[in-house]
Image: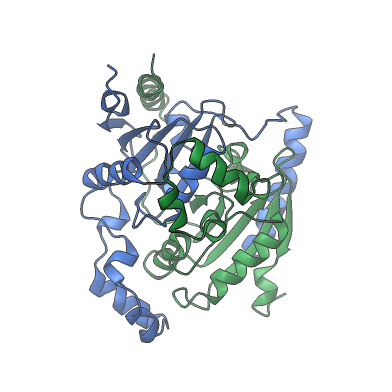
Chain colours: A blue, B green
Amino acid sequence: MSLLDRVLEKNKSYVKNRKEKGREEYLSSHAKKEALILTCMDTRLVGVLEEAMGFKRGEVKVLKNAGNTIRDNCSDVIRSISLGTIMMGLKEVFVVGHRDCGMTKENIEDIKKAMLDRGIEEQAINKIDLLKWTGIIDDEKENVIYTVDKIKKSPFIPTDIKVHGLLIDTNSLEIEIIVDGNKEKGEL
Amino acid sequence: MSLLDRVLEKNKSYVKNRKEKGREEYLSSHAKKEALILTCMDTRLVGVLEEAMGFKRGEVKVLKNAGNTIRDNCSDVIRSISLGTIMMGLKEVFVVGHRDCGMTKENIEDIKKAMLDRGIEEQAINKIDLLKWTGIIDDEKENVIYTVDKIKKSPFIPTDIKVHGLLIDTNSLEIEIIVDGNKEKGEL
């Protein structure tokens, strides 16, 4: 059975089960807690991160990319947070990095070699600044601080938005504060 | 209590509870199903989408942005899928659009007005092509087809990766196939 067929089969029984158990909830698209989480695509955060932060379906919006990082002002993250805050009522952003991030373990030479081995054209690679393009990071904490700063300084995000920086352990799921967005706004 | 304090308090009891109930699972960063989901930041998908597709923690990686769309080859999506497939062993991508997407309901005039009202500098707005920058979409299905196509045609993503396109209903969580990536690869 292909993975797609498995997904469709699982979905069928999920939908049926949800209906039978009366678990259906009709929610609006407005995030009730008016907050957004920016985190990593890492598989160990899947299905647990929101719960580990005490959030339920309907309460927050979630952005994910490789390394919860921002490469430039034209990134998907800036765009999504800009629209989320200006058009969709979001007021706080939680940048949630995690320990043991794969994006700290890559280096440009290995990436370039692997790209060529997998058939990526050298011409395409030469057109980009591979280091900037990949967004690999040196340190998870520094990356959280950097990302919070990029969001706060973006010309496309209102200055009254609170931006917090957190770090989660991928095993214990324990959260540590890196940047307290309340203090930054002069509140205790 | 601030939202940040609430998150930290909830996390403390979550971590304690998880430890006491023996729910801790130490997983590697490798996604066991070797698949990635690209979906929207919409709050109604939070905490349910992966389960509705039959996936658990540790099985898939997940990317999220506003409108599960791709604006250009330098997007976070292309970068993350490129690294995910070349460096992290992913073999299939599921682009999962959803009905009632907020990104179909915005228009450039309203966005520009709202940006100015919220203090975004006109000079900053004038430096970008606002329509392309925001990535607003006309139709959820067409956007899934477009996004699948952009991933398949990206010079930075190996051509042997299967890319599927799905659409999920935000209320029933029922999934419909838009693009069958198996068929595209000549398999039944």
Q: Position of residue B86 (x, y in %)?
A: 40, 70
Q: Nearer the viewer, residue B30 or A175?
A: A175
- Residue in the picture at 56% in, 26% down: A32
Question: Where is residue B81 drawn, in percent x and y?
Answer: 46, 64
Residue at 47 percent of width and 60 percent of height: B77
Q: Is residue A132 left or right of residue A20?
A: left
> Extreme top residue here?
B1
Left or right placement of residue A21 versus residue A111 in this view: right
| Horizontal arrangement in the rendering, residue A46 relative to residue B4 (left or right) | right
Kindly tell me whether residue A170 is visible in this rendering: no
* Residue at the spot 57% in from the left edge and 45% down from the top edge: B111
* Placement of the C terminus of chain A among the 4 image quadrants: top left
Above/below status of B92 relative to A35 = below
Q: How many marks can you see?
A: 0
* Location of residue A89 by image quarter: top right
The x and y percentages for residue B9 are 37, 19
Compared with A7, A132 (above or below) is below
Q: Most extreme residue toward the front, as rendered?
A: B123
Q: Could you tell me which quadrant the N terminus of chain A lies in? A: bottom right
Q: Does residue B130 show up? A: yes
Question: Residue A18: where, in percent of width, then height?
Answer: 72, 34
The residue nearer to you, when weighing B109 against B38, is B109
Q: Is residue B16 above or below residue B125?
A: above
